[in-house]
Image (cartoon, rainbow, N blue to C red):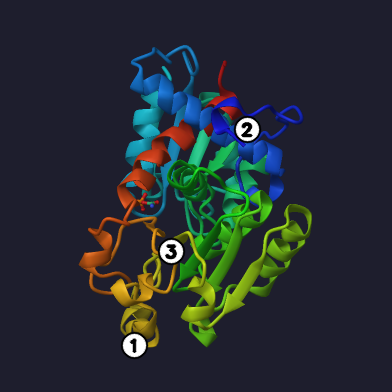
Amino acid sequence: MDLLTYTPQAKFAQQHLLCLQDYTPDEILQILSLAAKLKLQRRLGMDQTHVLAGKNIAMIFSKPSMRTRVSFEAGIEQLGGHALFISDAEIGLGTRESVHDVANVLSRFVDGIMIRTFRQSDVEGLAKYGHIPVINGLTDDYHPCQVLADMLTLYEHKGRLAGAKLAFVGDGNNMANSLMIICSKLGVDVSIATPADYAPQEKYVVWARRNAVASGAKVTITTSLEEALAGADAVYTDVWASMGMEAEAEKRARDFAAYQVNARVMSLAKPDAIFMHCLPAHRGSEVTDEVMDGAQSVVFDEAENRLHAQKAVLAMLMGKL
Ligand code: CP
């Protein structure tokens, strides 16, 4: 399968990007294919400003961000649109004003919403009560934009998705959930290695196993690094204490110590395995400098691909192609 020449199997029917479990494999591949094309066009210096010409997109942040904010803002500008940054300290989503009312008011002003927040229910509420596309820029449950960029990166480095194997090491968090979902949809074998008390929630494992029946992927949940990394084409990790869990950081540092991705752990995967991290990384905790800065690391390619993947999402949901 060549992403640049991928032929859609069906019309793209999604109105929002809330959770990739709502998407078919074909819809995910349509986004990845467009992302690859937009990336190539940008490299060739082609103008893309017709795609979102005249469109305003509100970007709401209740949590800190560097990559998500900058890549969305730059991407919207490259597509000819205008991005408005709004801190949730101003909106007070669900406190100063109800999700229902915020959704209705923003729908009168702008053409789309990208939101980073804690509760997935708030993102779903904006989509339910508003009349414009809503994009999930990370919640406590999912990080769909990140894993779209990750699949583009895996494809670029390994030349395939279906049949490849990705091993996630660390906390069974929103990244683990989203990676399980997208990998199992696309036929990428996915193994999640966590300490016993930090496995992903059963609901997401059930979804992934169901997706895998259709795609042929293998889903493994384990505490064993050796089992997870055997035959892996990609080794992925994330911080041990996600945003909002700072009070647990010391306990987590003890609980996750054996799950640090270092040169020994990388050697458990294929010799040409790539190292992936959504960033920001806590060097010396979940990953060592030698791995972050080593020849197998593709972490900055992943960061760049946030731009291209999100431009594709914006174009599919609210753009003119
Ligand atoms: N990976 C990611 O979402 O980065 P930011 O938190 O900087 O947006």
Query: Earlier along the polypeptide chain: callout 2 or callout 1?
Result: 2
Q: Helix, strand, or loop for circle 2?
A: helix
Residue depicted at x 27% and y 55%: 295
Depth check, mark 3 against mark 1: the one in front is 3
Q: Give the amino acid at mark 2.
A: Gln
Q: Give the amino acid at mark 1.
A: Arg
Residue position for label 3: 235
Location of residue 239 with respect to 31 vertically, above or below: below
User: Is residue 240 among what the camera can see?
Assistant: no
Location of residue 203 with respect to 272 vertically, above or below: below
Location of residue 4 with respect to 49 vertically, above or below: below
User: Is residue 202 among what the camera can see?
Assistant: yes
Q: Which mark is residue 254?
A: 1
Q: Nearer the viewer, residue 193 or 290?
A: 290
Residue position for label 2: 30
How packed mark 3 is, by other alpha carbons closer than 10 Å (few <14, some 14-19, many 20 or more), is many
Q: Could you tell me residue 195's position as x and y percent? A: 48, 84
Q: Helix, strand, or loop for circle 1?
A: helix
* Mark 3 to mark 1 CA distance (whole Å): 21 Å
Q: Nearer the viewer, residue 9 or 47?
A: 9
* Mark 3 to mark 2 CA distance (whole Å): 25 Å
* Mark 2 to mark 1 CA distance (whole Å): 42 Å
Q: Could you tell me residue 233's position as x and y percent? A: 48, 59
Check whether the beta carbons of the residues at disc 2 and disc 1 lie within 8 A of each other. Answer: no
How packed mark 1 is, by other alpha carbons closer than 10 Å (few <14, some 14-19, many 20 or more), is few
Instruction: Name which quarter of the figure residue 27 lies in.
Output: top right
Residue depicted at x 50% and y 43%: 159
Residue depicted at x 59% and y 25%: 5
Residue depicted at x 44% and y 69%: 269
Q: Give the amino acid at mark 3.
A: Val
Depth check, mark 3 against mark 2: the one in front is 3
